Image (cartoon, rainbow, N blue to C red):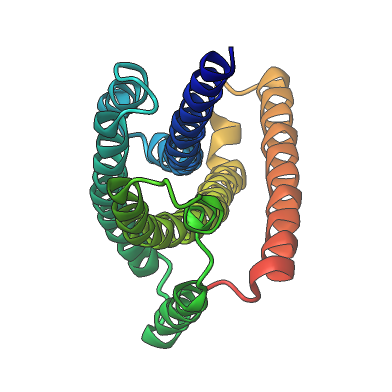
């Protein structure tokens, strides 16, 4: 009985060691896998929202994320590698979208006659913000390096370091993309407001020209000698006059409100 008990205790202790080792390995893998999923979800959502706002087709990006996250066991080495590859793909995608947004931004700057100083101020402030992010040492994968036991696998540690490096690049690209996109949307709104003012001003000029032309014709005495001209013609002229004046007054008031709003937000209009 003693010999049997000794064997059982030894075997149990051996199993416990194996179990603890497997638990430690599993815990390290899960920490890394969960952190990768969180980073991918956040970055993917931010990139998709911006790309869709630019009118781009993001179907391929969505399918790529689905393939990376759902077709492989979450604790496998292959899954971790696929997620890191997906992060790198998002870095490339965000650079592509950023380039498109920069081109749009340049067109808006030209259309709104922004000076080189104003453009430089935007880039300077953006560079300052990104420098602050670059100086930050915090990483979503710090918990993998800090919480794992000695049983953590070497490839998990290496993958955590690789993921940290790629995540820093991805975080910067997505941040810059969002700020550029915000500026593009702000300037689009500004351009639309300016175009609305210019368009309404042109309408007023056209109405004014029509009124002047109408009054010039109405002031000619020769028309009174025309047999076709009668009291009905005078009533028709007066109706037209009131209609045009009413339209002119309404549009002029709208233009006044639009100019007041513009000056409150943007200052003088060029």
Residue 265 % position (x, y): 69, 67
In front here: 246 or 211?
A: 246
Q: Say above or below: 86 vs 166.
A: above
Q: How many marks?
A: 0
Residue drawn 51% across and 58% down? 142
Left/right of residue 164 with respect to residue 144 in the rendered view: left
Residue 134 % position (x, y): 44, 74
Q: Say above or below: 134 vs 11.
A: below
Q: Say above or below: 224 vs 2.
A: below
- The quarter of the rendered structure image containing the N terminus is top right
Left/right of residue 159 with respect to residue 236 in the rendered view: left
Is residue 188 in view? Answer: no
Q: Say above or below: 62 vs 36.
A: above
Residue drawn 31% across and 61% down? 102
Left/right of residue 76 with respect to residue 121 in the rendered view: left
Residue 44 % position (x, y): 42, 38
């Amino acid at each position: 009985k003693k010999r049997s008990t000794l064997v059982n205790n030894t075997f149990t202790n051996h199993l416990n060691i194996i179990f603890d080792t497997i638990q430690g390995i599993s815990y390290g893998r899960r920490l890394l896998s969960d952190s990768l999923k969180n980073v991918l979800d956040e970055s993917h959502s931010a990139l998709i929202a911006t790309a869709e706002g630019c009118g781009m087709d993001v179907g391929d990006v969505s399918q790529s994320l689905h393939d990376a996250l759902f077709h492989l066991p979450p604790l496998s080495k292959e899954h971790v590698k696929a997620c890191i590859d997906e992060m790198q793909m998002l870095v490339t995608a965000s650079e592509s979208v950023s380039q498109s947004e920069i081109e749009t931004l340049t067109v808006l700057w030209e259309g709104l006659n922004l000076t080189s100083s104003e453009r430089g101020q935007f880039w300077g402030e953006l560079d300052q913000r990104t420098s602050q992010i670059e100086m930050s040492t915090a990483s979503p994968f710090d918990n993998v390096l800090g919480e794992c036991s000695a049983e953590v696998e070497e490839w998990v540690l290496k993958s955590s370091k690789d993921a940290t490096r790629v995540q820093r690049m991805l975080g910067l690209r997505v941040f810059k993309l969002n700020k550029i996109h915000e500026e593009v949307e702000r300037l689009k709104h500004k351009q639309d407001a300016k175009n609305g003012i210019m368009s309404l001003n042109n309408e007023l000029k056209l109405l004014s020209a029509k009124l002047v032309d109408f009054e010039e014709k109405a002031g000619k005495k020769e028309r009174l000698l025309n047999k076709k001209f009668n009291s009905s013609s005078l009533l028709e002229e007066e109706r037209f006059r009131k209609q045009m004046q009413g339209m002119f007054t309404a549009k002029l008031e709208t233009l006044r409100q639009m100019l007041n709003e513009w000056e409150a937000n943007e200052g003088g209009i060029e």
